[in-house]
Image: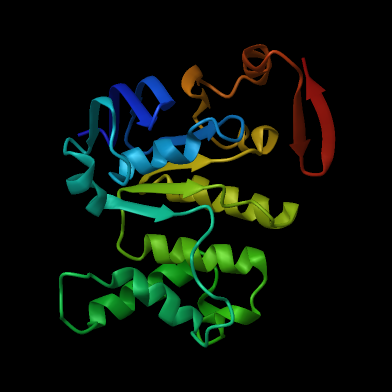
Amino acid sequence: MIPVMLRDVSVCFGAERVLEDINLSIGNHEFVAIIGPNGGGKTTLLNVILGLVKTSGGIVRVFGKPPEEGRKFVGYLPQRPSFDPSFPISVYEVVLMGRYRRWSLRKYTEEDMKAVENALHTVGMIDFKEKSIGILSGGQIQRVLIARALVRSPKLLLLDEPTASIDSEMQIFLYELLRKLREKMTVVIVTHDIGVVSDYVDRIVCLNRRIHYCGPPDLSEIARTYGHPVKLIDHGAHASVK
């Protein structure tokens, strides 16, 4: 069963059409980047896959199920995680929260604790497990939040601009991590790092209300889609593709 299938999907917020005629399938173990201008519908598209935004038309399936049912297989890192970094909570406890189920009154189990340890090992943060979340750098916090998204062993990982506001070295670390994770799951990332992410992903989706390009990370083709040069940022070097 393919992780994501959208057919003729549209979304309206009042009189404003945010997404229109979206047709997209994402296969098992693909690493896909969604790019496009601010306000182009990228976060809305992720929320459609999660079943958090209702469509105005079309069909959405997540592992063959309606998104409200399929999202139990999904890990998600939102663009602006809602937590107070000054709150006295440890890295371990933040990740453990990913095992919480609202409909269950059970206590955390040994299996939960092992899953937290494994997730922290995966993102390279196991040595920080007793540290307060508030003392971490932005890149370290992102790694912890990815661990929280991984702690339930998802089959599909959705990330909304996970490299925003972190330095270039940490960006490369995260992209390398995501490339490794795609061996176990499908990875979909919303990003503005066109030049860097093109070295890692299988496909790029250019979205501005509609899908204007969906295919291999061909930067010349993407530049034609945008209608102007695409600025590349590659390990600190700057260039343009026209």
Which residue is drawn at the image coordinates 43% and 38% (left, top)?
44
Q: Position of residue 80 (x, y in %)?
A: 54, 57
Left or right of residue 203: residue 176 = right
Q: Residue at x 40, y 41 (%)?
A: 46
The quarter of the displayed image where residue 134 is located: bottom right
**Displayed quadrant of residue 114:** bottom left
At x 51%, y 64%, the residue is 123
Quarter of the image where the C terminus is located: top right
Figure label count? 0
**What colour scheme governs how the chains and residues are painted in the rendered image of this protein?**
rainbow
Q: Nearer the viewer, residue 28 or 132?
A: 132
Residue 241 location in percent, x, y?
Answer: 76, 19
Q: Nearer the viewer, residue 122 or 203?
A: 203
Measured along the vertical axis of the image, is residue 42 above or below residue 124?
Answer: above
In the image, taking residue 83 as reference, residue 57 lies left or right, namely left
Residue toward you, 16 or 66: 16
Q: Residue at x 58, y 24 (%)?
A: 217
Residue 149's place in the image compared with 131, above or below, is above
Relative to 225, say whether 157 is above or below: below
Q: Residue furthest front?
A: 15
- State the image coordinates of residue 240 (x, y, percent, origin top left): 80, 24
Q: Quadrant of residue 35?
A: top right
Q: Quadrant of the N terminus?
A: top left
Q: Position of residue 110 (x, y in %)?
A: 25, 83
